[in-house]
Amino acid sequence: MKRISRHILVSLAAMSSMIVCAQTSPGATIESVIGHGDFIPRIPSAADVDRELGPATRSRMGNESFLCYSVGTRKLILFLDEGADDNDAAVEEVAVFGAGPVGPDHCPPVDIPALSKGFHGLDIGASVAALHRTGLDFSLDDADHSGMEKLKAYTFSPLRDQHDLYHRFYVQGNKVVGYSIGVTE
């Protein structure tokens, strides 16, 4: 009986150790989210991003909170979970925009090489016709973020049967002005 109890205690201790490690391990890096198109091993928090990229410009559009960085002539906008404290807030969408339609004018500069590769073979400035030629199965809606009412959102699920992960192209007029990787609640 003692031997069985000891094995159970050791197993319980190992399981609780794994749970604590999983809860405190850092989230995916922003570079890996952009490069891989997914939030693996887990969704990063605002504090994870701060450790990775340094302090961001924190801003709001309507009722939405986000972090902003500049990457060359582009803006990296990280939309945060609305219900959490600032540092614990999860990054729900990693978006990249060309100069213009979204975000504050001045954001701290960072270097993220993955941004130079475009997204699904397209880059900011691509035409809507090029977007359609990708053969991706899009849904087309108005952009759902405050302050982006003039943008159209071409959204699709990159993985079959995994609808909580989405990829999106933001379009203004006939041009792609941004793209993003996001998760739903």
Image (spheres, rainbow, N blue to C red):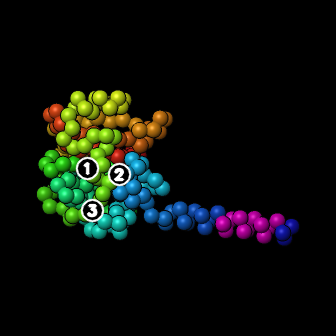
Amino acid type assigned to the residue bearing label 1 in the image: Val
Mark 2 or mark 1, which is nearer the start of the sequence?
A: 2
Between 152 and 1, the one lying in front of the other is 152
Is residue 129 among the parts visible in the rendering?
yes
Q: Is residue 10 a member of the stretch shown in magenta? A: yes
For the point 64% across and 63% down, the residue is: 15
Secondary structure at badge 3 equals: loop
Labels 1 and 2 touching (C-beta < 8 A): yes
- The 10 Å Cα crowd at callout 3, few under 14, some 14 to 19, many 20 or more, is few
Secondary structure at badge 1 equals: strand
45 left or right of 62?
right
Residue indicated by mark 2? 34
Stretch in magenta: 4-14
* Residue 98 rendering spot, x and y as whole percentages: 18, 48
Disc assigned to residue 111? 3
For the point 36% across and 46% down, the residue is: 182
Mark 3 or mark 1, which is nearer the start of the sequence?
A: 1
